[in-house]
Amino acid sequence: MDKKTRDELIAKADKLLKYETDKVITWCSGCGNYGIQNALARALVLEGKERKDFALFFDIGCSGNGSDKFEANTLHGLHGRIISTAAGAALANDKMKVIAFAGDGATFSEGVGHLVHGVRNNFPMVFVHHNNENYGLTIGQASSTTRLGAKMNGTPGGVSIEPINTLEFVLSLNPTFVARGFSGDVDHLTELFRMAMRHKGFAYLEILQSCPTYNRLTTEDWYASRVKYVEDLKGYDRHDIWAAKKLVQDMDKEIYLGLIYENIEKKDFLSLQTNREGVKTSLVEEVKHYDVRDLI
Ligand code: SF4
Ligand code: MG
């Protein structure tokens, strides 16, 4: 984060504080969720969003418990279903920025079908995948992103199944925005949140999140010693899907963060609805009582 942006944040500290809650914080000490919500608050302030301009949708899990830790319009949904819930809100009110959050269980197991169709339909929303590589809320079982050999509750001898390469999977769906951040680099993550909010279609933002209580393999230090930045790659073209697919192959030694892929040509779902062409209002504004007797 440059000095100008930092000064801007300091000047707007009162707006940052408005997102703080007096609810009991239930996250463990050192959890990556703190850094993620910090980056979110900073990004909202820097993008000039007021509370009425956005809504946050939370799935089930430790990430989902963020729903009452942020003073804003929030909804805590069903496990694995938050993309469809949030997409509905985004389509109903295109003047509101919709941001949805889910863990690796919800995203790549219970809700993986919703992820596929969220990306495919290019719904106008941000989707944040908290990837802490385990089911933290249910005390540390392996998820589909837990690494091979990791000793978890439920698999004390070590995980025997290879994890899903999440970004490779999303890139196979012809997405329009794929980025990856790290809960331990809040400045960088703030910028990724800002870029995702400005994107018109489905912005997939994955966050490598440390879970110090249950995932003893991928600790904050483990990530910190491996993450690299796309911005430092000379000649990297983020509009080249093949370059992106190649970059995300390595999940162990050099893990790249940043805006990895972007397609600004493909239209978002709402722009493709020809029945809405020229309509200036949102569906929310159009809700009223209609006399349907003549239609019966
Ligand atoms: Fe965070 Fe892990 Fe504790 Fe959940 S279990 S609050 S993810 S540290
Ligand atoms: Mg998880």
Image (tube, rainbow, N blue to C red):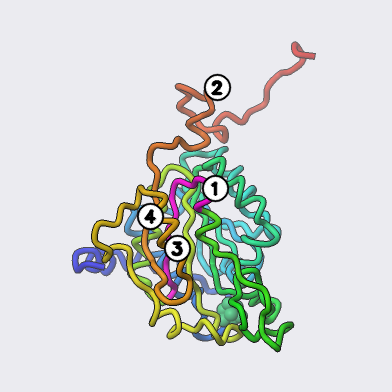
Q: CA distance from mark 4 to mark 3?
A: 9 Å
Residue 204 pos. (x, y %):
49, 54
- Count of labels in the image: 4
Mark 1 Cα-neighbour bin, 10 Å: few <14, some 14–19, many ≥20: some
Badge 4 is on which residue?
A: 243
Check disc 3 and report its element: helix, strand or loop.
Answer: loop
Q: CA distance from mark 2 to mark 4?
A: 37 Å
Looking at marks 4 and 1 on the same chain, the residue that comes earlier in the sequence is marked by 1
Q: Which residues are magenta?
A: 171-183
Residue 51 pos. (x, y %):
45, 54
- Residue closest to the eye, 258 or 285: 258
Q: Amino acid at mark 4?
A: Ala
Q: Examine the rendered structure and indicate whether residue 133 appears above or below residue 126.
A: below
Badge 3 is on which residue?
A: 248
**Residue 41: numbered disc:** none
Q: Residue at x 49, y 29 (%)?
A: 281
Q: Amino acid at mark 1?
A: Leu
Location of the C terminus by quadrant is: top right
Q: Is mark 2 within 8 Å of ligand 2?
A: no
Q: Examine the rendered structure and indicate whether residue 162 appears above or below residue 167.
A: below
Circle nearer the viewer, 2 or 4: 4
Badge 2 is on which residue?
A: 275
Left/right placement of residue 158 relative to residue 260 reads: right
